[in-house]
């Protein structure tokens, strides 16, 4: 009984984990290239969620077609914030970039609140579900999971097969060296920031396909914190590390919830969150390069 | 030991501002609440500046120290209320407990997080703050997510009238005293070996290490000092003023962000900076809420971005450069 429940929750965790992983790749990409932690990360996920919600509820466009729209909006926001704000802060101390990205997040939240209001919203895209015996998976969740994997693979190919991707990897390794070799480092910074934000806004679409309710201007905060844990699991600076970190995180989150629920006199949900932050500290202490020891 | 009074001149403008705030609040009707809020922001900035301003390390989980300070006072009052005759001594015990608890947390956090630098340090401290909050809620420590409510115990320990005076007047006075003490300690550190060591470490930690400076020791001194003031501030401005503690409130990351904004507005690493930053932040927050209710954050966010990009040294940082070489130089530090 308990094992069946655990196995069912782990399957859900794996599906959610793939989406979590994809939702963290943008954070890791930006940190890897610009050495900037995007504290406003969750706000960009929220923008993606609202894009999906608006396209579906107002125009009847299904969430799958929201993916390219979200990507374009994300890229545009990324270039906008890079050239207006981040470009001038590349050499600034952490204090400045942390506060600037936080303020960008607040700006997005308040703008969305002004347009859509602050109540919780949701949408209902019913396309049937698949029964696995131990758990039931709606097709929307499955599509979201497949979409995440596809985007991760595309990013991998783009990174390794294109000139721009190679330039980006060279900047991650050594930005001075890349500059000496004739790489347009400022252009790489701009492109990486834009792609990072684009990925993050897109992940907002996929996340609402998994959880189509609770969409609200302030929904991003908890995703920011989760993304930090996942990024650290993956070594902080590696987008692929982040993807696998997401899978691990999804499994641990759902698995530990099932186990904590067996303990008497505790709040299992809060303990799950505690475990994830304890994991964060432990990994930062003993293995700051991440579980996969990515470069 | 010979004391050179000129060393303490920079405290004059800081204390003058605090005195003016107290007098305005005391003598003008309806101003006390605003002055109390400003005092809280000045004290928050001043306490945070001791670590952030002097070391350049961004502690994103700073509010955790205020949280445990609040719990310290709450626990002292709820557990010791039955010992009659302690009187105001109960508050002293509470403040001491708040200091002890924030010191212990700072030692634990410092042992883990201070090994890390830059962004890794910032993320680790967020982890500590959130982790501690969810541990309290999840394992139901100190009543878990139900929190501690101690209005009744306050009334029992101090009498109804005194409890009300404590929450509406003395708590705010205590906040001002804490702010003044934090300013004194900041200046004392700045003008001693600690300050010079921390400046070296802030500019280049590896170089400082090579020069033979025990960077770990000085980082921990600044970290714990800053944490103790946060604990005291939590005990005074939160526990005594509003006698309840709920984990989601006292570990709200929002307060850390406010502290960072205040320090940055005024100028990180300066003595007068957090006071000026606290005044600017508090006044603009207060009046924006009156003029444009609901739109404060929408207006504030772009202003903050502009300040970071265009004026990274903050108001006092710019002022300091302006008065260099004049007699004012001795007062603005």
Image: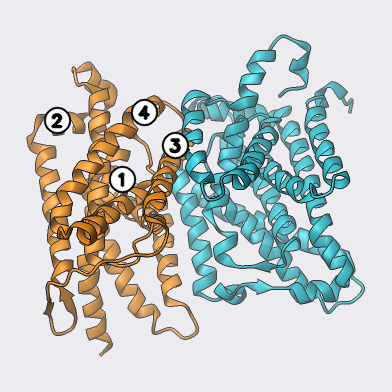
Chain colours: A orange, B cyan
Do residues under tags 4 and 3 come within 8 Å of each other at their CB atoms? no
Quick one: label 1 or label 2, which is nearer the N terminus? Answer: 1
Question: Which residue in the protein does label 2 denote?
Answer: A164
Quick one: label 2 or label 3, which is nearer the N terminus? Answer: 3
- Residue occupying the point 10% across, 38% down: A160
Name the mark on residue A208: none
Question: Which residue in the protein does label 1 denote?
Answer: A27
Do residues under tags 4 and 2 come within 8 Å of each other at their CB atoms? no
The outermost residue toward the right is: B85
Quick one: label 3 or label 1, which is nearer the N terminus? Answer: 1
C-alpha gap between disc 3 and disc 1? 15 Å
Q: Secondary structure at mark 3?
A: helix
- Residue occupying the point 11% across, 53% down: A150
User: Chain letter of disc 1?
Assistant: A
Question: Which residue in the protein does label 3 denote?
Answer: A100
Q: Indicate the quadrant where residue B319 lies.
A: top right
C-alpha gap between disc 2 and disc 3? 27 Å
C-alpha gap between disc 4 and disc 3? 11 Å
Above or below: residue B3 compared with residue B18: above
Residue B150 as seen in the image, left or right of residue B306: right
Question: Which residue in the protein does label 4 denote?
Answer: A84
Residue A249 % position (x, y): 30, 62
């Amino acid at each position: 009984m308990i094992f069946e429940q655990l196995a069912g929750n782990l399957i859900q965790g794996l599906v959610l984990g793939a989406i979590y992983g994809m939702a963290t790749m943008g954070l890791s990409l930006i940190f890897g290239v610009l050495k900037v932690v995007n504290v406003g990360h969750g706000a960009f996920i929220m923008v993606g969620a609202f894009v999906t919600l608006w396209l579906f509820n107002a125009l009847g466009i299904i969430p799958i077609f929201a993916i390219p729209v979200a990507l374009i909006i994300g890229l545009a926001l990324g270039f906008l914030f890079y050239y207006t704000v981040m470009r001038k802060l590349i050499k600034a101390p952490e204090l400045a970039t942390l506060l600037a990205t936080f303020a960008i997040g607040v700006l997005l939240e308040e703008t969305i609140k002004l347009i859509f209001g602050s109540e919780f919203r949701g949408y209902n895209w019913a396309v049937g579900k698949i029964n696995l015996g131990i758990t039931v998976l709606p097709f929307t969740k499955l599509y979201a999971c497949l979409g995440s994997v596809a985007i991760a693979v595309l990013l991998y190919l783009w990174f390794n097969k294109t000139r721009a991707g190679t330039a980006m990897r060279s900047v991650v390794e050594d930005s001075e060296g890349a500059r000496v070799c004739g790489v347009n480092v400022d252009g790489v910074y701009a492109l990486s920031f834009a792609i990072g934000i684009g990925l993050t806004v897109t992940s907002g679409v996929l996340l609402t396909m998994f959880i189509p309710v609770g969409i609200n201007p302030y929904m991003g905060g908890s995703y920011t914190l989760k993304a930090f844990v996942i990024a650290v699991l993956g070594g902080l600076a590696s987008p692929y590390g982040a993807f696998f970190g997401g899978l691990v995180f999804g499994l641990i989150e759902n698995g530990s919830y099932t186990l904590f629920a067996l303990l008497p006199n505790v709040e299992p949900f809060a303990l799950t969150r505690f475990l994830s932050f304890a994991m964060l500290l432990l990994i930062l202490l003993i293995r700051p390069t991440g579980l996969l020891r990515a470069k | 030991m010979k004391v050179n009074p000129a060393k303490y001149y920079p405290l004059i403008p800081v204390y003058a501002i605090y005195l003016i705030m107290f007098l305005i609040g005391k003598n003008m009707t309806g101003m006390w609440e605003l002055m109390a809020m400003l005092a809280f922001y000045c004290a928050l900035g001043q306490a945070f500046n001791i670590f952030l301003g002097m070391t350049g390390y961004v502690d994103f989980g700073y509010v955790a120290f205020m949280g445990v300070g609040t719990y310290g006072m709450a626990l002292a009052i709820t557990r010791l209320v039955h010992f009659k005759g302690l009187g105001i001594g109960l508050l002293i015990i509470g403040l001491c407990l708040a200091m002890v608890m924030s010191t212990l947390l700072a030692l634990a956090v410092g042992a883990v997080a201070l090994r890390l630098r830059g962004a890794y340090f910032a993320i680790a401290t967020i982890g500590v703050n959130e982790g501690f909050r969810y541990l309290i809620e999840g394992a139901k420590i100190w009543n878990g997510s139900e929190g501690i409510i101690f209005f009744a115990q306050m009334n029992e320990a101090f009498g109804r009238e005194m409890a009300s005076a404590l929450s509406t007047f003395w708590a705010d006075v205590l906040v001002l005293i804490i702010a003044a003490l934090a300013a004194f300690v900041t200046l004392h550190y700045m003008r001693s070996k600690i300050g010079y060591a921390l400046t070296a470490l802030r500019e280049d930690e590896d170089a400082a290490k090579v020069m033979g400076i025990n960077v770990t020791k000085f980082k921990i001194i600044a970290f714990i000092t800053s944490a103790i003031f946060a604990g005291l501030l939590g005990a005074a401005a939160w526990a005594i003023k509003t006698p309840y503690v709920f984990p989601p409130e006292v570990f709200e990351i929002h307060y850390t962000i406010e502290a960072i904004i205040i320090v940055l507005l005024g100028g990180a690493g300066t003595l007068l900076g957090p006071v000026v930053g606290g005044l600017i932040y508090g006044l603009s927050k207060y009046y924006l809420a009156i003029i444009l209710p609901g739109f404060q954050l929408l207006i504030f966010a772009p202003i903050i971005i502009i300040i970071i990009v265009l004026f990274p040294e903050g108001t006092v940082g710019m002022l300091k450069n302006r008065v260099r070489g004049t007699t004012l130089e001795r007062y603005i530090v």
